[in-house]
Image: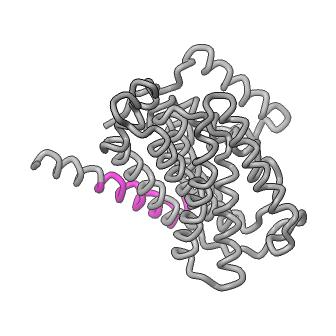
Amino acid sequence: MVMNWKQNSLKVAIFLGTYWLITALEKAGILLSYHVQILSLCCINVILAVSLNLINGFTGQFSLGHGGFMAVGAYFSAYLTINFQTPFSIALGLAGLLAGMVGLAVGLPALRLKGDYLAIATLGFGEIIRVIILNTPALGGARGLAGIPPYTSFGIAYLLAILTVVVIKNFVNSDHGRACLAIREDEIAAESLGIHSTYFKTLAFALGAGFAGVAGGLFSHYLQYMAPTPGQIGFMKSIDILIMVVLGGLGSITGSIVAALTLTILPELLRGFAEYRMIIYSVLLIVVMIYRPEGLLAGKELS
């Protein structure tokens, strides 16, 4: 117990020290507002990657609808803060709750499917959400939703990223998480031992969707403008998140964090090679997948 207390105290000290260091560097002018904004985006992507890893990596499902859950949280929180001046913390909580409920509604029928069929079903859901937003004038329609308050700061994004990692790590280590791991390894064997696979798959799906909704709320109040384009809330966004999970390693929270940071910062570092940026980015991904097909930290964690 004493050792656990010391380890937890050390982790808290590292988290707080990192935040204070970044804040001090910003005040000293070493880190510009641009750098802090990129760090905020890194934290948002960490939430998205870790929450999708719960579904794809730890539970063994294949979801391509994470961008849709993110869109639900992004637009709902923005709608609340614009039209009802809802406090940001409440708007984020309600956005996560709504996204989780939508994930529950989608997961109950869709998670009876497996493999590619589940991927197609969740992909269709994400596109349905995008088209609904596209044709809803109250959400800005095709012109997008502007005037979103700039509430997302590095401190809030950093705190919620840590909270996401802690909650999902504890969930994976709990009895419910062990049941999800058993389903991933062999669903038939798990059911023969009395594990209700539909219940646990839906639970993980709803939990991951809820955190995606929170990330969406942070994202909309970071950009201050949302548009129903495939790259921002649709299919391509879901693919970006999936790449982070696969690159980091399925079933590795640490891997998802490392990949989210890498794939957020790397395109910015390559801006000096404007015309070749995406080519270099793509080649690097191909090289990593050739030599590390299981991901950077497949199934491994840094304690």
Range of magenta residues: 12-31
Residue 294 screen position, x and y as percent: 52, 20
Residue 234 screen position, x and y as percent: 76, 49
> On the picture, is 79 further left or further right than 15?
right
Q: Nearer the viewer, residue 296 or 111?
A: 111
What residue sits 53% from the left and 76% below the top? Answer: 90
> On the picture, is 89 further left or further right than 119?
left
Residue 230 screen position, x and y as percent: 81, 48
Majority secondary structure of the magenta segment? helix
Colour treatment of the image:
one colour
Residue 180 in magenta stretch = no
- Residue 148 falls in which quadrant of the image? bottom right
What residue sits 47% from the left and 60% below the top? Answer: 160
What residue sits 69% from the left and 31% below the top? Answer: 117
Q: Image height check: is 38 above or below 173?
A: below
Q: Nearer the viewer, residue 264 or 175?
A: 175
Residue 283 screen position, x and y as percent: 72, 23
> On the picture, is 140 further left or further right than 36?
right
